[in-house]
Amino acid sequence: MKEYQSAEVKELFAALCKAQSEIKHADKKESNSFFKSKYADLPLCFDASRPALVKHGLSVIQISDFDEANNLFLVTQLNHTSGQWIRGYYPVISTKQDPQGIGSAITYARRYAYNALVGVAAIDEDDDGNAASGNKAPTMASDHFDKHKKKWNKLVVSFSIVTGK
């Protein structure tokens, strides 16, 4: 049975709440020439979030592993200095079974699993997943994000008042 979190997560969630109020959008600077689109690569996603995570005692590790059926998957774990953690499992599916294809699928999985776990979003739509799904991802307007960012900030302030942290 897979484990998804440590026995306690209160301190981790408090730190993540604070960090997410400071995490920035990832800039879409990389180009997908096949779909004529732009996307935020993994280093840009790290750049958008790592300062806020570190500031609040959070770190992320990602490792690949195999399940009982020998299927490759990625484990992404968010850790807090308290020792608390949460993790997610992401199946790594590659259409090409060579080192380049598998490496590309792992990088794709790392980016999506990382962004989902810590709350990173690209500035505009991120549709480089068309190769996997054939569908175009919805857009997130900057004013919509800013509206929700204010709610996160209010939540952080309320949490700080209630807990004294």
Image: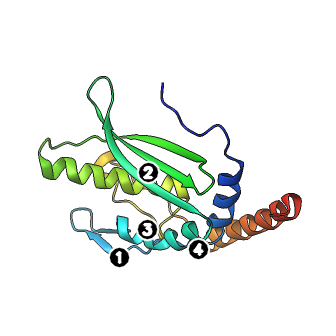
Looking at this view, name the residue that lies furthest to the left.
Answer: 98
Q: Earlier in the sequence, mark 1 or mark 4?
A: 1
User: Mark 2: which secondary structure?
Assistant: helix
Gap in angstroms between the C-alphas marked 4 and 2: 22 Å
Foreground residue among 4 and 149: 4
Gap in angstroms between the C-alphas marked 3 and 1: 14 Å
Q: Nearer the viewer, mark 3 or mark 4?
A: 3
Foreground residue among 3 and 82: 82
Q: Horizontally, is 2 left or right of 33 in the view?
A: right
Q: Position of residue 160 (x, y in %)?
A: 82, 64
Foreground residue among 82 and 97: 82
Q: Earlier in the sequence, mark 4 or mark 2?
A: 2
Q: Horizontally, is 162 left or right of 101 in the view?
A: right
- Residue displayed at 85% across by 63% down: 164
**Which mark, residue 46?**
3
Query: Which residue position holds label 4?
Result: 142
Q: Horizontally, is 18 left or right of 76 in the view?
A: right
Query: Which residue position holds label 1?
Result: 29
Q: Residues within 10 Å of mark 1 (few under 14, many from 20)?
A: few
> Which amino acid, by three-letter code, is at mark 4?
Ser
Gap in angstroms between the C-alphas marked 2 and 1: 20 Å
- Residue displayed at 35% across by 76% down: 29
Instruction: For the residues labelled 3 and 2, say whether their Cβ atoms are less than 8 Å apart.
Output: no
Q: Taking the image as drawn, is residue 146 in sight?
A: yes
Q: Residues within 10 Å of mark 2 (few under 14, many from 20)?
A: many
Query: Which residue position holds label 2?
Result: 113
Q: Earlier in the sequence, mark 2 or mark 1?
A: 1
Gap in angstroms between the C-alphas marked 3 and 4: 20 Å
